[in-house]
Image (cartoon, rainbow, N blue to C red):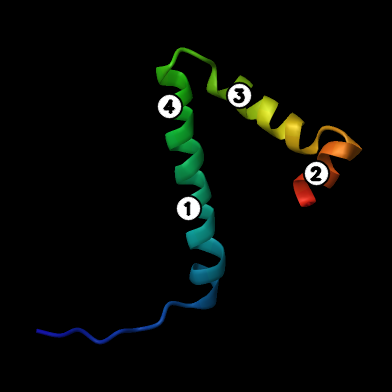
Amino acid sequence: MSTASVPLPGWITYGLLPFLNILTAFFISGLVVWSIGEDPFAALRLLIEGALGRGDAIGFTLF
């Protein structure tokens, strides 16, 4: 029993799959943060603020 390997369209390979991977990572990390008793949305806000909050932060993020 063999099945033919059909390549996926580009919009799935380069758009949908990375989006689903990031969404899954945020969901799992949110569950971990929630399980230790913290607010996942506050943690996400701190993460974004730390990475993009100031000019220095943006520079270090890109570096």
Q: Position of residue 40 (x, y in %)?
A: 54, 23
Q: Residue at x 56, y 69 (%)?
A: 14
Badge 2 is on which residue?
Answer: 60
Residue toward you, 11 or 63 = 63
Q: Residue at x 85, y 46 (%)?
A: 59
Query: Contact (CB < 8 A) between labels 2 and 4?
Result: no
Q: CA distance from mark 2 to mark 4?
A: 26 Å
Residue toward you, 55 or 30 = 55
Badge 3 is on which residue?
Answer: 43
What's under tag 2, amino acid-wise? Answer: Phe
Q: Earlier in the sequence, mark 3 or mark 4?
A: 4
Check disc 1 and report its element: helix, strand or loop.
helix
Check disc 3 and report its element: helix, strand or loop.
helix
Query: Contact (CB < 8 A) between labels 1 and 3?
Result: no
Q: CA distance from mark 1 to mark 3?
A: 20 Å
Badge 1 is on which residue?
Answer: 20
What's under tag 3, amino acid-wise? Answer: Ala
